[in-house]
Image: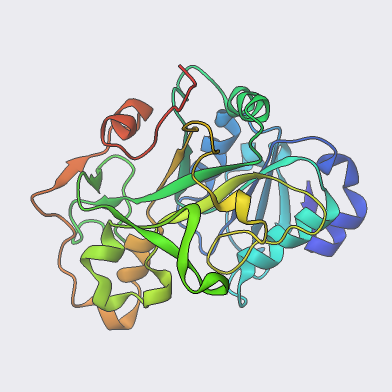
């Protein structure tokens, strides 16, 4: 289905938002839009919403399987605007959001779909799942000038760290079970990345509820949603492997000609398999064995 605007969708497609999980893909450009949509359909989301400029192409066979919504993807805080409108319109269901050229992986995703994971999370009394955004990049920027290649994708196997998240309201004491995570290309090329955009953590899977809002730093207004685990044991975390930073650094005038390669001694080919991400410590199964 095709909708002329987000308002049009929310007014005419209420049945689409009656049951989750729902995946929202915000396509900022035309890079790997179809592969992103296919990946999240295969992951098991009941509904996939594609918000993008009407000129962005999509494989024809995907049109009847998703809900395409005309949307300005480069407006100020476009993702927050879209997610918060959906939360308001459909409280009480599981949602997920990402950009194009980003791909969600969860533990054992090759044999267990996203619906099974969210049933387990509900049983664990969790309403949000922490995701680490793991940068992907092509090995040869001459052959792939936008830094995107699914067949020759690499990631950093080391260079990640976490800092306690401070609570300004409590004299900058550490927040309970919250950290700011860093690493990947935003760490290696930090001189080209504003300080406020260097974090790689994102609460991308969550259960909507009245009054909940997504903030510009990809955290939520309910602080419990921003925790990496509950108080009594470890919980599942997920990974979003993403070309977004790599292609941004190669398209921005300030960094485009400064970066000749993303490859270094800690680069490793991405296997497109959840076990590799778990082995590298980029996500964990918690109590889900």
Where is residue 228 drawn, in percent x and y? 49, 44
Q: Position of residue 196 (x, y in %)?
A: 43, 74
Q: Nearer the viewer, residue 167 or 36?
A: 167
Q: How many marks?
A: 0
Res. 145 visible in picture = no
Q: Going by the picture, which residue comes out furthest to the left?
A: 265
Q: Quadrant of residue 16?
A: top right
Please indicate whether residue 80 sits to the left or right of residue 178 in the image: right
Please name whichever residue, 266 or 126, is drawn nearer the observer in this view of the structure.
126
- Foreground pick, 33 / 208: 208
Q: Residue at x 62, y 63 (%)?
A: 79
Task: Tell whether 85 sits left or right of 61.
Answer: right
Camera-nearest residue between 200 and 98: 200
Residue 30, x across and y down, in percent: 50, 59
Residue at 35%, 28% (x, y): give it.
273
Q: Is 122 situated above or below 133? A: above
């Amino acid at each position: 289905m095709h909708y002329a605007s987000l308002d049009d969708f929310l007014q005419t497609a209420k049945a689409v938002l009656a049951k989750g999980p729902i995946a929202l893909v915000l396509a900022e450009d035309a890079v790997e839009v179809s592969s992103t949509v296919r990946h999240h359909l295969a992951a098991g989301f009941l509904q996939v919403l594609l918000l993008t400029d009407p000129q962005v192409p999509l494989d024809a066979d995907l049109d009847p399987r998703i809900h395409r919504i005309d949307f300005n993807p480069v407006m100020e805080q476009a993702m927050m605007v879209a997610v918060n409108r959906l939360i308001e319109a459909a409280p009480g269901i599981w949602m997920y959001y990402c950009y194009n050229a980003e791909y969600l992986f969860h533990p054992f995703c090759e044999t267990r779909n996203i619906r099974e994971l969210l049933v387990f999370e509900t049983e664990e009394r969790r309403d949000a799942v922490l995701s680490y955004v793991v940068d992907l990049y092509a090995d040869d920027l001459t052959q792939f000038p936008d830094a995107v290649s699914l067949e020759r994708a690499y990631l950093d196997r080391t260079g990640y760290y976490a800092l306690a998240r401070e609570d300004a309201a409590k004299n900058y004491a550490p927040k309970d079970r919250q950290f700011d995570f860093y690493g990947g290309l935003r760490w290696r090329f930090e001189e080209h990345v504003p300080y406020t955009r260097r974090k790689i953590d994102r609460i991308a899977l969550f259960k909507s509820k009245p009054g909940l809002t997504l903030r510009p730093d990809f955290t939520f207004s309910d602080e419990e949603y921003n925790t990496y685990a509950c108080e009594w044991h470890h919980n599942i975390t997920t990974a979003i492997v993403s070309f977004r930073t790599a292609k941004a650094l190669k398209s921005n005038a300030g960094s485009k000609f400064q970066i000749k390669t993303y490859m270094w001694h800690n680069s490793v080919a991405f296997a497109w398999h959840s076990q590799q991400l778990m082995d590298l410590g980029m996500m964990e199964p918690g109590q889900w064995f």
